[in-house]
């Protein structure tokens, strides 16, 4: 079984179990930083780790995977197919070139982790990167051959556009719902599948946080890191509930 087929199989399984999603943003003093989305599916391994290890490994004796690939490498492999896309779709995918995907699975340790991360020069770049994820997901849906796998896209498609801003005094996270897409796409099944899952925001800044619009935010001792946990159904069904405004001292 190829690595990408393993990814596709794991993604399908993850859609039907309790997972913990974490959206991380780390902002440096100069405004640069890094962004990542992590998915912890260790609950699945606790239930059926041995069977999954056998299915995903190249031999029955090997029950662990630790693999990393960049989207730039993937796009290079699929350059002929990408060249047939519209200029808009190609530009959107190009914004994802710096993303790196990591998958770690260990049946004995009951461990199953996905992560997708990228550096950024400015927080505002993230909205373009997120639109690239949506484009990749849309292309995958159109392709019967599923030539370009998007391991995290299926679970993260909530019919909204996510925008970020940061100017040193204020940080905002704003989800704008695509109401037309929402009308065409029922979230009923997704809500059922992710009923016990969680979506966590974990943001670190170079200066102390003065206030957060969400009263449930937890602060680190130095007030430079905030953490907020939501039911995943909020992310899927009501993404605007996760809108944030953060002010700094």
Image (cartoon, rainbow, N blue to C red):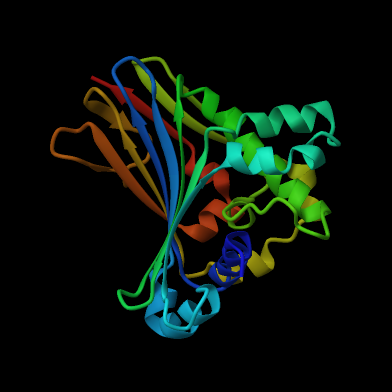
In percent of width and height, residue 56 lies at: 53, 73
Residue 186 position (above or below residue 218): below
Nearest the viewer among 158 and 55 is 55
Give the residue at x 79% y 52%. Answer: 183
Nearest the viewer among 114 and 61 is 61
Q: Is residue 121 visible?
A: yes
Image side of residue 211 versus residue 34, left or right? left
Dividing the picture into quadrants, the one containing residue 76 is: top right
Residue 58 position (above or below residue 239): below
Give the residue at x 62% y 51%. Answer: 153
Number of on-image labels: 0
Image side of residue 190 versus residue 126, left or right? right
Give the residue at x 47% y 70%. Answer: 18
- Which quarter of the rendering shows the N terminus? bottom right
In percent of width and height, residue 219 lies at: 22, 40
In percent of width and height, residue 231 lies at: 45, 59
In percent of width and height, residue 215 lies at: 32, 42
Dividing the picture into quadrants, the one containing residue 44 is: bottom left
- Which quarter of the rendering shows the C terminus? top left
Q: Is residue 176 visible?
A: no
Image side of residue 110 versus residue 55, left or right? left
Give the residue at x 43% y 42%. Answer: 36
Q: Residue furthest left?
A: 221
Residue 61 position (above or below residue 57): below
């Amino acid at each position: 079984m190829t690595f990408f087929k393993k990814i596709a199989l794991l993604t399908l399984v993850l859609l039907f179990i309790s997972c913990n999603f974490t959206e991380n943003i780390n902002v440096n003093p100069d405004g640069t930083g890094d962004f990542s989305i992590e998915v912890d599916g260790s609950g699945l391994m606790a239930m059926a780790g041995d069977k999954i290890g056998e299915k995903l490994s190249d031999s029955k004796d090997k029950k662990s995977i630790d693999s990393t690939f960049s989207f730039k490498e993937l796009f290079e492999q699929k350059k002929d197919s990408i060249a047939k896309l519209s200029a808009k779709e190609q530009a959107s995918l190009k914004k994802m070139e710096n993303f790196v995907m990591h998958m770690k699975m260990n049946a004995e340790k009951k461990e199953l982790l996905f992560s997708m991360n990228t550096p950024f020069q400015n927080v505002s770049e993230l909205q373009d990167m997120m639109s690239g994820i949506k484009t990749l997901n849309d292309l995958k849906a159109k392709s019967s051959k599923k030539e370009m796998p998007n391991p995290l896209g299926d679970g993260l498609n909530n019919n909204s556009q996510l925008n970020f801003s940061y100017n040193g005094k204020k940080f905002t996270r704003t989800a704008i719902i695509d109401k037309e897409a929402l009308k065409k796409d029922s979230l009923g099944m997704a809500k059922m599948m992710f009923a016990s899952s969680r979506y966590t925001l974990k943001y670190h800044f170079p200066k102390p946080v003065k206030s957060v619009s969400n009263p449930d935010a937890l602060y680190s001792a130095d007030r430079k890191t905030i953490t907020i946990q939501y039911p995943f159904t909020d992310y899927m069904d009501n993404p605007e509930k996760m809108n944030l405004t953060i002010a700094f001292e």
